[in-house]
Amino acid sequence: MNILQTFTALRYPNYRLWFFGQLVSLFGTWMQMTAQSFLVFELTDSPAYLGYVGFTFGLPSWFFMLYGGVVADRMNRRTLLLAAQTAMMALAFILAALTFTGLVQPWHIIVLAFFLGVANAFDAPARQAFVFELVDRKDITNAVALNSTLFNLSAVIGPTVAGFVYMLTGPAWCFALNGISFAAIIGALLLMKLTPLPPNNQKGSALTSLKEGIRYAAHDKIILPILCLVAVTALFGFAIATLMPAWAVNVLGGDATTNGLLHSARGAGAVLSALLIASLGRFTFRGKLLTTGAFSFPVLLLIFAVARGLLPAMIMMLLLGIALVLVMNLANALLHTQVDDALRGRVMSIYSLTHFGLMPLGGLIAGWIAEFSSEPVAIIASALVCLVSAAAIWLWVPKLFTLK
């Protein structure tokens, strides 16, 4: 471990703008996510409805995310990000206005979640590929790790603050503060001085480009299993995040503050894990760490499912955050090092689709199981699927877990 290498990517001026702009914006995003999920549960008293909202957010990914990757490979990524972030800011202010006026209904949240998902379908592939424009190739892994750090650092602070703000003033201010926070990333994007990329030489239709990206990912012996591991983790591993409000109330007997503390504990573990990866610099045992995360995550999830009490639950959420980042962060970094530059946006759109398309579907399934049985049963089922899948991928492509 080399502490001096932990923040290597911050030496790049454009990446510094990106990092701090994102930190503020993601703080607001986590506030809204936490407050929105608890508001939905208060309005409906239904864990299944939590899954419906998440599924609606993820639905546009299936229609637009891969096309978003084609767009990210063909147009200026900063321009694409500016358009997507502005749209997200507007949606946050609409939700805030509906909540301030007392008019908000569950169907409003469903509709806004859908349009947020549309904006995200174009934002996510561009965001993933854009990092490559901010740092040199040799520092991509460090930049990806720091991206994860800022995402999860905001996940520590945002939900906790959201829980207290929710209890003191209600959810509307959480949504309004999220809208305001978008000014930071929009301003950062406008201030960047980017080196022009080589001219794009893609020919043919968008559909042809899309097929090329899918064919490339499907036939690569390293990229395909990485994407499979990410897909399983997104589909089943994130079920706990969807069920968190119901878990806080029904299992732990808590409230909005309990919900925020659980989210923050997971975020704290994720920050520690991401900083560890960043501090390792240009290390040569990424595959081994990926293996550790892939097997430890479902085991920890099983322990969490049977743990009771706020303190044990927070400890397990901390450890789950560490393991989850080992899987998702290292998978992201390994994809960046394996993919051809000309196909980066399209391959990262497939990676993003596994997040934003499969994660809500997994939340929907977990919500149904919890509705008709219990939250612990839903988590145990998800953990077992993740464990079996990790073993199957390990047997399928053992080389994946020895990558440097």
Image (cartoon, rainbow, N blue to C red):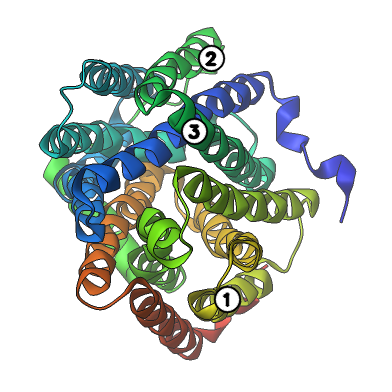
Q: Residue furthest bottom?
A: 395
| Amino acid type assigned to the residue bearing label 1 in the image | Leu
Relative height, residue 247 to residue 232 (above, below): above
Q: Is residue 201 visible?
A: no
Q: Nearer the viewer, residue 332 or 375?
A: 375
Q: Which residue sits at x=14%, y=33%?
A: 105
**Inter-mark Cα distance, 1 to 2:** 38 Å
Dot 2: what SS? helix
Judging from the image, what secondary structure is the residue with disc 3 in? helix
Q: Position of residue 369 (x, y in %)?
A: 24, 74
Residue at 39% over, 48% down? 348
Q: Is residue 193 above or below residue 255?
A: above
Chain-order first, disc 1 or disc 3: 3
Closer to the camera, 333 or 319?
A: 319
**Tag 3 residue:** 162
Task: Locate the N terminus and report the quarter of the image it occupies.
Answer: bottom right
Are the residues flagged by discs 1 and 2 in contact, CB closer than 8 Å?
Answer: no
Please say if the residues under marks 3 and 2 sit with CB atoms less than 8 Å apart.
Answer: no
Give percent across and percent down for residue 186.
44, 14
Q: Which residue is mark 1?
A: 300
Query: Label 1 to label 3, Cα distance in Å?
Result: 26 Å
Q: Is residue 86 left or right of residue 308?
A: left
Instruction: Decide which of tag 3 and tag 2 comes sooner along the chain.
Output: 3
Q: Which residue is disc 2 drawn over?
A: 188
Amino acid carrying mark 2 in the image: Ala
Looking at the image, residue 289 lies above or below residue 353: below
User: How would you rate the neighbour count of disc 2 (Cα within 10 Å): few for under 14, some for 14-19, many for 20 or more?
Assistant: some
